[in-house]
Amino acid sequence: MPQRVDSFEAVVLPHLKAGYNLARWLLRNDHDAEDVMQEAIVRAFRFYDGFSGNNPRGWLLTVVRNSAYSFLQQNRARELGTEFDEDLHGEIAETPEVLVLRSAQQRLLNQAVEALPVEFREVFVLREMEGLSYKEIADVAGVPIGTVMSRLSRARRNLIAAVARREQVGSAS
C-alpha cells in the first residue's frame, strides 16, 4: 500500500494548483473550490488503480471537473446550462481585500470571466490559464473538439463584450 500512496503523490501533487485553479474558476468561490478539491483528491485516490499513467494533469483535471460539476448540480443547478445574461451574471460580489489588491483592469477581466456560464468559463480557464490543447480540453470535458472550439469562441466574444460594456459604464461615470 505505501508504494501506491507514493506513486499517487508523485503523480497528483504536481498538478494540485492547476486543479484548484480550475475548481476556483468553475465555482467562483474559494471555500467551495477547496471542498471540491478535497473530494476530487479522494475520488482520484479511490480510482487511482484505473489510471493508465498517461497525462496525469489531464486525468486530475477531469476528476476535478467532474467533482465541480457534481457540486454545482447538487448545490447550484441553476448555473448549469444557463446562457450568458448580463443581468443574471453581471455582478460578482468580491471582498474589499480582493478589490484593493487587484488592479482595475485585472479586476474587470476576472469579473468578466466569472460572469461567463460555467461551460464557457471551463474551456477558457483550461485553454488560457492552464494551457491545455483543444484535444486535452475535449478529453477533460468529455465533449468533441468542435464543441471546445465553439465554447472557447463564445467565451472570448462574451468576454470582449462584457469588458467593453464595463469600460463604457466606467468612463460614463
Image (spheres, rainbow, N blue to C red):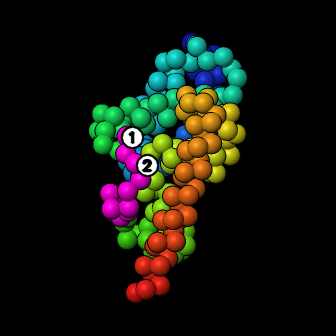
Q: CA distance from mark 1 to mark 2?
A: 8 Å
Please identify the quarter of the rendering in which residue 19 is found.
top right
Taking 28 as reference, is 111 above or below it? below
At 54% from the left and 52% from the top, the residue drawn is 155
Mark 2 nearby-residue class (10 Å; few <14, some 14–19, many ≥20): many
* Number of numbered discs: 2
Q: Is residue 61 left or right of residue 100?
A: right
Mark 1 nearby-residue class (10 Å; few <14, some 14–19, many ≥20): few
At 48% from the left and 42% from the top, the residue drawn is 119
Element under label 1?
A: loop
In the image, what residue type sits under mark 1? Gly
**14 and 127: which one is in front?**
127
- Say which mark, if any, is on residue 81: 1
Q: Which residues are magenta?
A: 80-93
Reply yes or no: does residue 10 show up in magenta: no
If the image is split into quadrants, where does the C terminus sit? bottom left
At 43% from the left and 57% from the top, the residue drawn is 115
Taking 166 as reference, is 62 above or below it? above
In the image, what residue type sits under mark 2? Pro
Element under label 2?
A: loop
Return the x and y of residue 54 as percentages of the image width and height. 70, 23
Dominant secondary structure, magenta = loop
Q: Are marks 1 and 2 in contact (CB under 8 Å)?
A: yes
- Say which mark, if any, is on residue 117: 2
